[in-house]
Amino acid sequence: MALTACTSGAASPPATVPPPVVAVAPAPISATGPASFVLAGQLTQGGWVRGIAPAGTASLTFDGAPVPFAPDGHFFVAFDRDAKPAATLVARLHDGRNETRALAIAPRAWQIEHIDTSPLPETVTSEEFRRRRAGELARIGAARARDTGTEGWRQDFIWPAAGRISGRSTPSWPYVFAPQHVTVWSVRSAQL
């Protein structure tokens, strides 16, 4: 059934109708994969796990957050420095079933270093610092949101230099002047 409008003047060409949008479900991973999760890594605060999702996984979550996984079912998750003692992986299978794996996260004794100084020069206010940092944080967020297809997470970590570890920086160095914590990640290694 076509609808037309009555107008004076030249007739306008009929509008093109876009084709219907058809949702396509992602292809399941190999049906010959594992029946349950396969996990390897460090189940500890600040640790990580590399895993393989069960065969037929359509989606994967870690404590409710979506986890991307490769077509062969491999994935990577990491635990916060202050991770709770329990976490849950859930694979939603193409047939509608869920495969759930409870993870026990071991506590870790962190060497937290305290810095009794301001991270900012005395002439920079917190408001000015936040304004300066906003653009940088936006670029960091955009970079983290990009899916480049790289799979560096499959590789083992390679230390950039050998030597004793002279200090560890954690994500909550409390500075004397600030009620909030400042996020800093680093490991200092003194080369021998």
Image (tube, rainbow, N blue to C red):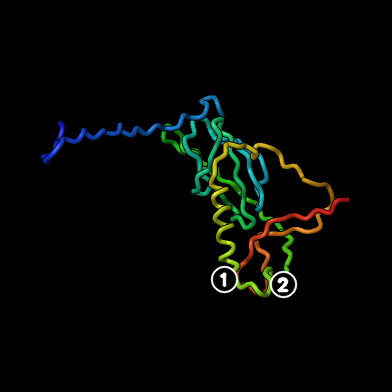
Question: Which numbered circle lies on residue 139?
Answer: none
Looking at marks 2 and 1 on the same chain, the residue that comes earlier in the sequence is marked by 2
For image coordinates 45% across by 32% down, the residue present is: 26
- State the residue in front, 56 or 126: 126
Determine whether label 2 and label 1 are within 8 Å by CB: no
Tell me the amino acid under the disc marked 2: Thr
For image coordinates 47% across by 35% down, the residue present is: 58
For image coordinates 59% across by 46% down, the residue present is: 103
In the image: residue 116, left or right of residue 80: right
Q: Specify few, some or many for label 1: CA neighbours under 10 Å numbering under 14, 14-19, or 20 or more.
A: few
Residue 80: percent from left, percent from top: 62, 54
Q: Specify few, some or many for label 2: CA neighbours under 10 Å numbering under 14, 14-19, or 20 or more.
A: few
In the image: residue 180, left or right of residue 20: right
Disc 2 to disc 1, C-alpha distance: 18 Å
User: Pointer 2: what residue?
Assistant: 117
For image coordinates 54% across by 55% down, the residue present is: 138
User: Pointer 1: what residue?
Assistant: 127
> Residue at the top extreme?
32
Residue 34: percent from left, percent from top: 56, 30
In the image: residue 72, left or right of residue 166: left
- State the residue in front, 105 or 117: 117
Tell me the amino acid under the disc marked 1: Glu
- State the residue in front, 11 or 138: 11
Residue 46: percent from left, percent from top: 66, 52
In the image: residue 97, left or right of residue 169: left
